[in-house]
Structure formats: structure tokens, C-alpha cells
Image (cartoon, rainbow, N blue to C red):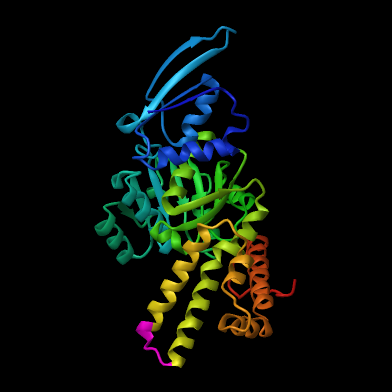
Amino acid sequence: MAMWSGDGFPSLWKSATELMIRDIFLRPGKIETIEITLSLHNFNKLSPLLGYNVASAAGGADSEGHTWFQHVIGGSMAEKVLEKSRITIIGAGAMGRAIIHTLTGSGEIDPGNVVASDPVPEQRELLSERYGVRVSANNKEAMKNADVVVIAVKPQVLPHVMTELNGSIPQNALVFSIVAGMPIKTMRLGFDHEAIIRAMPNTPAQIGEGMTVWTASSAVTESHFAQARTILTAMGKELYVEEEGELDMATAVSGTGPTYVFLLMEALVDAAVHLGFSRRDARELVIQTVEGSVKYAAQSDQHLARMRNLVTSPGGTSAEAIYQLEKGGMRTVLSKAVWAAYQKSRLLGERAEDPLEAPLHIDSEG
């Protein structure tokens, strides 16, 4: 059993303390029970943030008259935040399915408490059979009595969904949007609802290895924060930011990032085939090389440039390859691509209220 005493938790939900304790709770088996001694005021902040409710408590006062409470949380006594929550997914495409898959697969929620709304009959049938969730073709019906309403439609569909659901979302519900480029202000007016979280996940979230950057409106409560973090940690890693503008930057880096990686991998496979490898062997070589390099970098505290230099011998094959990549402007092209994605995300936000019927082209210079 681990012990933690004290009441020094300024800006608790932003501190490294939070990350350490969350790591204990979100990975069962590390510590079965943890005792935390602190004031009831701060514990009431801590408990929903971590995603668990109080299991037991005892109290008293120290020699200086400070009231303290000792709460024991752990094992089967802890109640999951989403265990009794009702979640509606509006739009069951790739990312909508990813949320359903990770939440039901991790045991964070009973599939019977999830309703997926999608206009495609085959999609609804697939979700019902594969995950055991309830399905609907009617968005309004699907979100009745919902505690969390996940908006997972394409940007061009959002205006229609906002018109349809305006003023109908349950008052205390959390709107959790993963719609690219859509500002909170637009959704707050469109849905006539105040508690909104805007998140930007990426493709690996479909297997629980995603990276999501997110922010929240001022009306989002601590219990809403706990619900959101539970959803996001089931999908991978998450980063909360205060400034909504950072989501446009995240869209260009982590949101669009898998596209850059897949293109690099595709080019490497083609190059290996050109050398004489079969496409199957080339694919295996590239995937393992990228996966191994990522894991190696993640476990090292060295700067990426230093790591590259360590494997670049003077006059060697790496040095010759890097010369050609630099000569071809790889860094410049990649930087322009990220800038273009950032500008496009901002433009989507600016035109959020207009039907996005025509392609939106932007200047990639920056």
C-alpha cells in the first residue's frame, strides 16, 4: 500500500503530481490501494480528476487545528467515471468507431450505455454486432438522457447537425467534439449549449495509441474534465491546452502527422522494391525500422539531432543519404506541409458556418 500525505496541491490538475497519481490509477496492478491524506476541499478536486469516486474516508484535526481527511481508494472499491454514464456518438465513422472500440474494449463503460447514431444501415448493424452498443438513425432520439454527446462527423456535415440538435442537448451533458477545425464558439452558438470540449485526435487512436490535444469551454466542470480524460486516455495519450488556437497547431503536427509518416513509409517501401526486395519484405523492413526507431527515441532523453548524428558516420551510407535528403529540401518541404495544414485548419474554423462545398486552397508559404 502506498501512502501520500499533505495538502500542497496548488493548481492540482496542472501539476506533475496529477500525472503521477493518474498513472497509478489508470494502470491497475501497479498499486492496489493508495492512501492520500489531504483536505476535503482538495480531495474533492482530486477525486473526479483522477476518474474515481471516494471509496472510504476518515477525518480528524492536527495539532494546528487543520482539518484532514484520509481517503482510501483502490482495487474493486474504486468506481469508474464512465461506468454509469450514458454516451451518445453522433457519426460512427472511423474516429467514432475508435472511441466505441477503445471505451468498450477497456471496460470503461458498459456497451449498453452507448448509443451510436449513423445514417448508414450497414454501419449501424456492424456496430451493434461487433460492440454490443445500441444504434439509431435519429440523432435527437439517440442523445436523449445522454451524459456525454460525442460529435464525430465531418466538418461539412456539422452545420446540419448543429441545426438539427440546436437547443435539444441535455442541459448538464458534455459535448465532446472531434470535428476538425471547428471552434468552440461556433459549436456553442450552433448547439445552443455551453459545456463543450474540442479535441484533435489522430489515426492511431483507433488502436489506443493516439495523441490527442484538447481544450474546453469555461462551462466545463471538473466532472466533465474527468469524463473527457477517461475517453481520451482510452484512445492513447492526451495533452490539455488552455489556448484554443493551439489545436490548429496540433492539427498540423499530431493530427495530420500520421499522413507524413505513412508517406515516408510508402516512399521507403517503393525504394526498397526498386532495389530488388519483394513488396512484402520491403513493407516488413520499413514497418519494423520505423517502429523500432520510434521506441528507441521515446526511451532516450537525447536530442533527435544527436541521435541522428550518432548513426551518421563520416563518409558512410547514412551521410550520403542525408546529403541527398537535404539537397532535395526535405526539411523545407515538410515545414511547408505542416504550415499548409495549420492554415487549412484555421480556414476551416473561419468558414465553419458556411457549407464547405468547394475545396479551400491556401498559400503554403509561411
Q: Which residues are magenta?
A: 276-281
Q: Residue furthest front?
A: 314
231 left or right of 45 in image: left
Is residue 126 inside the magenta stretch? no
| Figure disc tally | 0
From the top left corner, tell me how far across and down residue 57 is, in percent: 41, 18
Residue at image coords 37%, 53%: 102
Residue 217 vertical placement versus 177 (above, below): above
15 left or right of 48 in image: right
344 left or right of 267 in image: right
Q: Quadrant of the N terminus?
A: top left
85 left or right of 361 in image: left
Residue 156 vertical placement versus 247 (above, below): below
Which picture quadrant has residue 204?
Answer: bottom left
Q: Quadrant of the C terminus?
A: bottom right
Is residue 168 in view from this perspective? Answer: no
Q: Nearer the viewer, residue 322 or 237?
A: 322
Residue at image coords 54%, 65%: 156
From the top left corner, tell me how far across and down residue 351 is, in percent: 65, 63
Q: Nearer the viewer, residue 252 or 175?
A: 252
From the top left corner, tell me how far across and down residue 55 is, in percent: 37, 25
Q: Residue furthest right?
A: 366
Is residue 33 in view from this perspective? Answer: yes
From the top left corner, tell me how far across and down residue 252 is, in percent: 61, 65
Q: Residue furthest left?
A: 129
